[in-house]
Image (spheres, grey):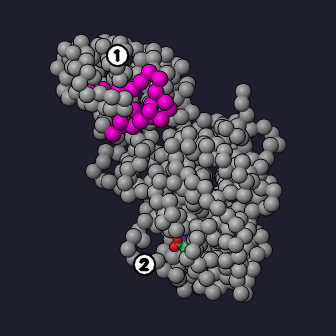
Amino acid sequence: MVKPVTFTFEDVNIDEISTFAGRVAILVTPDGRMDNAARRVNRLTKGAVARLSEDELKAGDARVLAYPVGMAANAVDVICLDKRATQEEARAAGVALAKKRGKDNVLVCLGNHNKAEQIVLGLALRDYGFDAHKTAEAADDARAVTVMVTKPDEVKEKAAPLLAIAEGAFFTRDLVNEPANVLTTEDFANRLVAMSDLGLEVEVLEEDKLAELGMGALLSVGQGSVSPSKVVVMKWMGGEDGTAPLALVGKGVVFDTGGISLKPAGGMEDMTMDMGGAGVVAGTMRSLALRKAKANVVGLVGLVENMPSGNATRPGDVVTSMKGDTIEVINTDAEGRLVLCDVMHYAQETFKPSAMIDLATLTGAIIIGLGHENAGVFSNDDGFAKAFLKAAGNEGEGAWQMPLGKAYADLLKSRIADVKNVGGRAAGSITAAEFLHRFVQDETPWIHLDIAGVASTKTDTTYAPKGASGWGVLALNRLVSDRFEIKD
Ligand code: BES
Ligand code: MN
Ligand code: ZN
């Protein structure tokens, strides 16, 4: 499934530049300075690089010299990048290369650029396509990127954790892009179990166990589907023994028809991405394991399918959550919170986490509020929220804090049960967050991320082509290293 491009790091070998068949990428600075590789290309092309950079290049630009005479390459990508580029600019240079390269192998000449590994990450992240169901695509499409740098071992070492993060993001994107007849709850769980090869401890809780635990809210969502509901727990205990873990909890609705409160037909096919929260949790756990993070993190996902059937939950039904609170199901399409409330409760009871973050494609209302640029951030702990916002900001993943408050929670009062699952049209994302808040134990710092607008988009984003973005994998990795990882 996941087939990230393979990167090889090698010493600067000027002679290879003229003989490399594929694409060659070189860097020039905005004031036209060239490293050895760029100078060689310039000489081979009789000054084309110099003329190009004089005439039209400013920082961030990328140009192509097609079929350069005197070289075996099909094209040379000339990227204009400052020696003192920011992380964002360096990644953008990599993104520009990824967009141009098509199916070619590439020789990327980065000389001694001090953010070479960030250029590599940008290239890796943007070089993604979901072709699992395109019969024409070559299955063994083995593309390679050779990175030519003055200190290959050093750059390789710096790039390794970043490539682990990219691979985690790819895992998320594959899950989110996959249709629901392929990614059933069973298939999803199997893909997570397979991650035990990476050193993750993975446990699947089946329906009988969930019933025994009292997860009546979660089970009420899946009961109309032939696919069994599951909770999967992934543990990465790379930190200090005995340190309470960070808990990540994800909504994994493999398909959301709305249930008996059926959604309209138009656009319903997009609800294959309603497991996006679980996808981000899974991708983050994968990258933590791949980069052997020195942190204790548990990832829990609730996998269900929301279908209408003779056995489905009805509007008006009352269900009992694992916490014991009874919930009046006003609308069976507000199912994500029913799944999360039980998994969040279980996570706190089982792991006594030092902090908890849940991720969910929870409300259409967050798209009305924030569009596709920012995820909604809700928290009971301002310091924790700030740390997340900073991590997301540093990684270029949009996130915007929204309020919580008792007045919103009050909109969820039920006539016949402890709480109801919808609070009306007004502030739909906030009342959804307040529903979850009720299941957060007092002492747990908690963040809820409503990713309905950012998990999958109809247009390209900075780091991903249209479709699943993998939003959150970078930010969560950064938050883990900022706050939860042992520093050596
Ligand atoms: N999965 C949807 C939210 C969603 C909408 C995600 C659009 C991605 C794109 C969620 O389960 C849902 O249906 N929410 C309802 C809640 C309402 C019934 C209170 C909504 O947003 O309309
Ligand atoms: Mn729904
Ligand atoms: Zn949903």
Residue at (57% x, 58% y) in the render: 376
The image quadrant that residue 5 belongs to is: top left
Would you name the residue on which mark 1 appears? 34
**Amino acid on which disc 2 is placed:** Pro
Q: Nearer the viewer, residue 220 or 26?
A: 26
- The mark that comes first in sequence, 1 or 2, is 1
Rendered location of residue 388, percent (x, y): 63, 47
Task: Find residue 264 and name its label.
Answer: 2
Label 1 secondary element:
loop
Q: Residues within 10 Å of mark 2 (few under 14, many from 20)?
A: few
Q: Is residue 468 visible?
A: yes
How far across and how far down the image is residue 448, in percent?
A: 64, 58
Question: Residue, x 44% and y 33% (percent of image)?
Answer: 89
Q: Which residues fall within the magenta stretch?
A: 75-99
Circles 1 and 2 in contact, beta carbons < 8 Å: no
Residue type marked 1: Met
* Residue beneath the point at 48% across and 46% down: 170
Task: Answer above or below: position of 338 versus 317.
Answer: above
Which labelled disc corresponds to residue 109?
A: none
**The image quarter in which residue 295 lies:** top right
Q: In the displayed structure, does residue 124 sit left or right of residue 69?
A: right
Say whether mark 1 is within 8 Å of ligand 1. no
Q: Would residue 210 be found to the left or right of residue 81 on screen?
A: right
SS under mark 2: loop
Rendered position, 224 above or below 364: below
In this rendering, the answer to whether 46 lies above or below 351 is: above
x then y, percent, for residue 50: 25, 18
Is residue 213 placed above or below 38 in the rendered structure? below
